[in-house]
Amino acid sequence: MNTRASNKSLMRWAIPVLMATVLASGSALAQVCIPNCQDQNISLLNQPGADLSNANFSNAIVGSALLQGTNLSGANFSNAIVNAMIATKANASGANFSNATLTGSFFNGANMENANLQGAILADVGLMGANLTGANLDGAYVVGGINTSSVALTKSTLTNATLTNAVLTGVDLAGTSLSGASLQGANLSEANLSKADLTSANLSNANLSGADLTGATLASANLTGANLSGADLTGANTTGMTGDDEEEDDTEDPPE
């Protein structure tokens, strides 16, 4: 009886200590390799509120990352594979995520101004309220698994962002600022763009089939060659918008 009770008591503290040791090992590895963690395999990057500006995580594999409020300005995550990066309210301005794979990550409220997300794969990400002004998402692939609505870019700032050929099928962009954004050839089918600001945006040859554009601002936007089949533009501001259907008004009335 005493031995059994002793074993139970031992297990009570041994398991938490073991768990903490496993977690700490990943964190310790990250601590050792920072600022140059290129090609490293890190189980846990636990650096909330830390200064990781210009740190190098290119080609790294990160099991999970706790980076709330962390300074990631100029950090390099190019070609990295990162699962569950929690970077809410982080400063990732000018960070390089080109060709990175970010799964189950959250950048809600983060500053990602001028960040490079060219060719990145963003699966089940949260970018609600994030500032992506001037960010480059050229060729980025944004997916939400089975439910693409789980990808939240709601009310984000993507002013002048480059989203050429980006795959944004079914993505929630409601209320997002996309003024001046380059969206040539982007796939926005079934996307929620209600009340989005697309002033002077370039949507030429974009796929907007089935998109919700109710109440959106499309003033001076370029939709030449865009696919708007099934799109809902109820209440949208289309002042100065250019598109293919303008040519249909050239036909003269037949003589009496």
Image: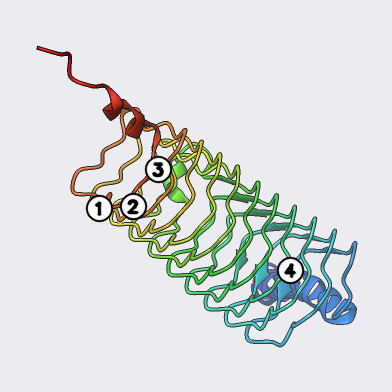
Q: Which of marks 2 and 4 is nearer the N terminus?
A: 4
Q: Where is residue 167 in the image (x, y as percent from the top left)?
A: 56, 41
Q: Mark 2 points at which residue?
A: 218
Look at the numbered discs 2 and 1 and tell me whether their residues touch, using CB distance below 8 Å. Answer: yes
- Discs 3/2, front: 2
From the viewer's perspective, is 118 left or right of 89?
Answer: right
The alpha-carbon separation of the residues under discs 2 and 4 comes to: 44 Å
- Examine the rendered structure and indicate whether residue 207 appears above or below residue 235: above
Inter-mark Cα distance, 3 to 2:
15 Å
Could you give the CA–CA distance between mark 1 and mark 4, rounded to whole angstroms? Answer: 47 Å
Q: Earlier in the sequence, mark 3 or mark 1?
A: 3
Query: Which quadrant of the rendered structure holds the N terminus?
Result: bottom right
Mark 3 crowd level (few <14, some 14–19, many ≥20, 10 Å Cα)? many
> What residue is shown with label 4?
44
Q: Is 133 displayed left or right of 103 in the figure?
A: left
Asked whether 82 or 138 is in front, the reply is 138
Q: Residue 100 carries which label?
A: none
Q: What residue type is labelled 4?
A: Leu
Could you tell me which residue is drawn at 41 percent across and 37 percent down?
208
**What kind of element bears circle 3?**
loop
